[in-house]
Image (cartoon, rainbow, N blue to C red):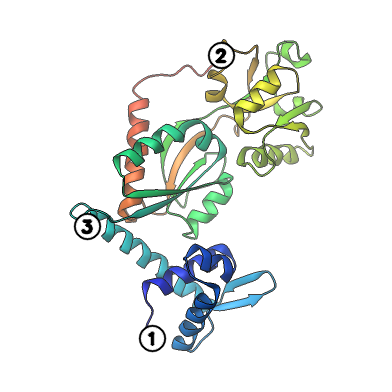
Amino acid sequence: MHFDLIDLRLFQHTLECGNITAGAQRSHLSLPAASARIRAMEASLGTPLLERNRRGVQATSAGQALLQHARLIGQQVERLQFDLAQYAQGLQGQVRLLCNTAALSEYLPELLASFLADYPAIALDIQELPSLRIVQAITRGAADIGIISTAVTSEHLQTVPFRDDPLVLIMPPEHPLAAHVHLRFADTLSHGYVGLAPDSALSLHLEEQALHLGRRLRIRVRAEGFDGVIRMVAHGAGLGVVPLAAVRRWQGVLALHGVVLHEPWAQRQLLLCARDFAGLPGHSLALVQHLGKAHIERSTSSPDNSPA
C-alpha cells in the first residue's frame, strides 16, 4: 500500500465536494489524473473506497476509515509547515473557517484583515453556513474552525466565547407594531418582512423559527446584507430581524424603531468551535488565538445592549 499526500488530499476533497470532478478541481488536478489516482488507491488496497452513483460519490466503510486518517495526516502536515515556517520563509498555509451570517458581516472583516497582515504566508477559505451545518461540518472534520450561535447544540465540540450577538426586530417608527413595548416573534408573522438572500444563514434560521410556530415568513423583498435590510426597513418596506451590532451602525442616521426579541434563540452568543483546539494545525490555532484575543480585549468594556 502506497499513498502520497496528493492522493490523500484528493480523496478528502472528493468526499467533501461530493464528486470526483469538484474534488479534482479543488486539488488542482485534471479529472483523468484524479480518477486514475483514486483507481490506483483502490487497487493498492484491494477494496473499493468510493460508492459511485448519479448524485456523486460516497465513502465505503474502508473509505470512511481512510478519510479519518487523511484528515489527521493533513492536520499534522499543516502543523509541521506552520512550525517550520518560523524558520523558513515562503511556506504557505490555508485555514478553512465556517461562520454564520452575523459573524461574517459584523465582526470578522477587520479581525481577519489584521490576522492576514500579521501572517502573510497564510490564506483563508471562508464559507457562510447556518450554525447547525457548521456543527455538522466540524464534527465530521470538513473544517477545523467554526463560528456558531448558541441556538444550536454543540456540547460534543470544544467552544470558547466570541461575541454577544442578540437579534433585534426593526421597523419604521410609524409601523403598527411600533406602539408595542414587548413583542414576540409570533406577533410579527402576519406582517411583511425584508429578508436576506434565501440561502443566508440568518434567513434559514428565521424561517426555521417561523416553521416551529406553524407559520411562514412573509418575505416582501430580499436585500443584500444587513445594511440593505436596515435601509429598506427604514423606508417602509417591512419588518426586519438583524443583529444589534448592525443596528448600532445606523443609529442617528436612519429613523428606526428597534424591539428586543426575548425568545431564547434571539438572545444568542457567538462561539468559536473546534473538535479539539489543542489538536488544531498551527495555522488554524493561530487564527483561534487571534480571534480569542480580540474577544478578551473587547470584554474589558461593557457594551450597551439596548437597540437603537
Query: Residue tagged by mark 2?
Result: 251
In percent of width and height, residue 17 lies at 56, 63
Q: Nearer the viewer, residue 53 or 295?
A: 53
- Residue at image coords 40%, 19%: 302
Query: Residue tagged by mark 3?
Result: 84
- Residue at image coords 47%, 84%: 40
The residue type indicated by label 1 comes to Met
Position of residue 306 in the picture relative to residue 286 (left or right) = right
- The local secondary structure at tag 3 comes to helix
Disc on the earlier residue, 1 or 2: 1
Q: Report the Cα–Cα distance between label 1 and label 2.
A: 63 Å
The residue type indicated by label 2 comes to Gln
Up the image or down, 74 lies above or below 115; here it is below
Query: Residue tagged by mark 1?
Result: 1
Which residue appears farthest toward the right when viewing the image? 190
- Dot 2 crowding, Cα within 10 Å, few <14, some 14–19, many 20+: few
Position of residue 266 in the picture relative to residue 29 (left or right) = right
- The local secondary structure at tag 1 comes to loop
